[in-house]
Image (spheres, helix red, strand yellow):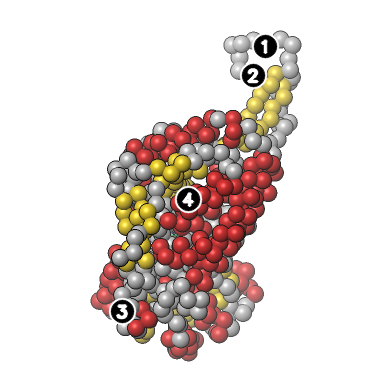
């Protein structure tokens, strides 16, 4: 048997063994076989990492850098990531089983966040206020928050971390990251690159292991100022509650049950591709999955036939091959969960018109594969339409007109993203106003950029990532009052 790659944790610029002395196995979803060992951290490791980050915040080496110098470090990190993008992409595939076509592209795109926020670092300006008091000079400064904890899920570990890390570092914070226990390798590899870029020790730290064992110890630590979390709604609510006890600033990027709405005036060929990319890309393991396909009744049958025909052509198999279109799902529990939801959909009366189980293709071997699956005749009240499956399972829900489409679209607890397919400019302008989601795509789907704010309405989350304002989520504002009066006035009266 080949030896497993053994990782350690990264604290204060050094690799350390976990306090428990224990390691968790990381599996390659394509083969179902372990390939790496990840430290199983506990509270002691969490406290050590927070203490290193706190010291880095207080030390001159980081604090005395001006914003231009911080921006320079971020841009250097972007360059180093670019050089390592192919390698990082393969590590991501090894851990989460997503396609090399997607993870490779994602890793090549990461540097843009470091360039963008590196450029923004020295453009955050305070203001001199036209204050209404005599003999007073009042101005604002924007300061970092302090120690920021970042907790990430398994589906896109580096991308989801980068969306937090780049603005946090640009703002001058120090960071402790806790990646998913299923996919920690790429974040640990990133630590080497952060060091190579020249960030002072302690500014970036990584601990690994289970949420309740090490994540919670970070979230409840009194020296942590901010928690940026991406993950499932239940863990998110738990993190929010725990962080509230010490009034930490929290952002949550949680689940979704996004509607992809197809009107009868759309370009059908384009909309079919949009529906496919919404649900079968990344084997449906994306928070923005367009898992509810709302199709206008007038084109329902024609559209469904074309969709099924197209979906049947998807090439399923080895995620490391550049032309594979559907890979395995990331974890064994997730694999079981998805199959369970298929049973629930059938029991609730939905009709399975494609897939519906585990594929038997020889290319899939022992991997955790699920067939691209489509259920027709879904009622929006069914569990398959209300609950996040996080797999390649699409529900088709017919609708009559605009009002009904909007009503169904909004009738879930989530509000992360949505899609609209139409050739009518009025619909393209008006329907986005009525949909309760943080992102609305019109005649496109699954587009993401460092420039456009991203986040959820309703139970899909709190706060926004990406875009200029995201840097403010990692800063706090101070008002400084300087008196220029010769004499201090009556001390018993508020000025
Ligand atoms: P998860 O909630 O199980 O785990 C996410 C992270 O939280 C992991 O690192 C985990 O160890 C940690 N965690 C779990 N319990 C914790 C606790 N009590 N305290 C601290 N940390 C804890 O989610 P997952 O299964 O890894 O990821 C899938 C979920 O993530 C889906 O619901 C998906 O929609 C969501 N997601 C959201 C976005 C978004 O941007 N909105 C992006 C990707 C994924």
Q: Determine contact: label 4, label 3, CB under 8 Å.
A: no
Q: Which mark is residue 495?
A: 2
Q: Is residue 130 above or below residue 170?
A: above
Q: Which mark is residue 489?
A: 1
Q: Position of residue 276 (x, y in %)?
A: 48, 78
Q: Earlier in the sequence, mark 4 or mark 2?
A: 4
Q: Residues within 10 Å of mark 4 (few under 14, many from 20)?
A: some
Position of the C terminus, as image quadrant, is top right
Cα distance in 3D space between marks 4 and 3: 35 Å
Does any portion of residue 389 appear in the rendered image?
no
Determine the secondary structure under disc 1.
Answer: loop
Q: Residues within 10 Å of mark 2 (few under 14, many from 20)?
A: few
Residue 20 left/right relative to 224: left
Determine the secondary structure under disc 3.
Answer: loop
Q: Is residue 138 above or below residue 451?
A: above
Residue 164 left/right relative to 468: left
Q: Residues within 10 Å of mark 1 (few under 14, many from 20)?
A: few
Identify the residue under disc 4: 462
Residue 320 left/right relative to 33: right
> In which quadrant of the rendered view does residue 373 lie?
bottom left
Cα distance in 3D space between marks 2 and 3: 72 Å
Determine the secondary structure under disc 2.
Answer: loop
Q: At x 33% / y 78%, what residue is drawn?
A: 365
Cα distance in 3D space between marks 4 and 1: 45 Å
Identify the residue under disc 3: 357
Q: Position of residue 280 (x, y in %)?
A: 44, 75
Residue 151 left/right relative to 197: left
Q: At x 38% / y 36%, what residue is drawn?
A: 47
């Amino acid at each position: 048997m080949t030896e497993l790659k053994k990782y350690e944790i990264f604290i204060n610029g050094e690799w350390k063994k976990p306090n428990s002395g224990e390691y968790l196995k990381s599996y390659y979803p394509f083969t179902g076989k372990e390939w790496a060992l990840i430290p199983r951290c506990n509270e002691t490791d969490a406290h050590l990492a927070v203490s290193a980050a706190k010291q880095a915040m207080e030390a001159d080496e980081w604090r005395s850098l001006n914003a231009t110098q911080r921006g320079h470090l971020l841009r250097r990190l972007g360059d180093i990531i670019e050089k390592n993008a192919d390698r990082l992409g393969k590590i991501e595939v090894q851990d989460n089983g997503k396609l090399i076509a997607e993870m490779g592209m994602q890793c090549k795109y990461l540097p843009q966040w470091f360039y963008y926020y590196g450029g923004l670092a020295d453009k955050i300006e305070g203001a001199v206020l036209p204050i209404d008091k005599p003999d007073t000079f009042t101005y604002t400064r924007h300061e970092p928050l302090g120690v920021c904890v970042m907790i990430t899920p398994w589906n896109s570990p580096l991308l989801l971390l980068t969306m937090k890390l780049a603005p946090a570092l640009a703002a001058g914070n120090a960071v402790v990251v806790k990646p998913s226990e299923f996919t920690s390798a790429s974040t640990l590899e990133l630590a080497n690159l952060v060091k190579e870029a020249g960030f002072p020790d302690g500014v970036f730290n990584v601990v690994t292991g289970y949420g309740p064992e090490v994540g919670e110890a970070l979230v409840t630590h009194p020296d942590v100022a901010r928690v940026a979390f991406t993950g499932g709604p239940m863990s998110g609510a738990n993190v929010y509650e725990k962080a509230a006890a010490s009034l930490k600033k929290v952002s949550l990027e949680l689940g979704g049950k996004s509607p992809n709405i197809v009107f009868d005036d759309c370009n059908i060929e384009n909309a079919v591709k949009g529906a496919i990319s919404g649900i079968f890309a990344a084997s449906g393991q994306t928070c923005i999955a367009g898992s509810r396909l709302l199709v206008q009744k007038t084109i329902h049958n024609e559209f469904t036939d074309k969709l099924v025909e197209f979906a049947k052509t998807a090439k399923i198999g080895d995620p490391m091959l550049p032309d594979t279109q559907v890979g395995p799902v990331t974890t064994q529990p997730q694999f079981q969960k998805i199959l369970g939801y298929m049973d629930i959909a059938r029991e609730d009366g939905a009709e399975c018109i494609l897939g519906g189980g585990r594929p038997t293709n020889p290319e899939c071997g022992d991997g955790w594969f699920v067939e691209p699956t489509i259920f027709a005749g879904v009622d929006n009240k069914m569990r398959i339409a209300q609950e996040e499956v996080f797999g390649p399972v699409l529900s088709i829900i017919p609708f009559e007109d605009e009002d009904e489409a909007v009503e169904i679209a909004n009738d879930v607890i989530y509000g992360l993203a949505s899609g609209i397919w139409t050739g009518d400019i009025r619909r393209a302008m008006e329907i986005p106003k009525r949909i309760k989601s943080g992102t609305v795509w019109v005649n496109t789907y699954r587009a993401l950029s460092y420039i456009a704010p991203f986040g959820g309405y309703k139970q899909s989350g709190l706060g926004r990532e990406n875009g200029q304002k995201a840097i403010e989520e990692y800063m706090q504002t101070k008002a400084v009052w300087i008196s220029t009066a010769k004499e201090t006035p009556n001390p018993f009266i508020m000025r």
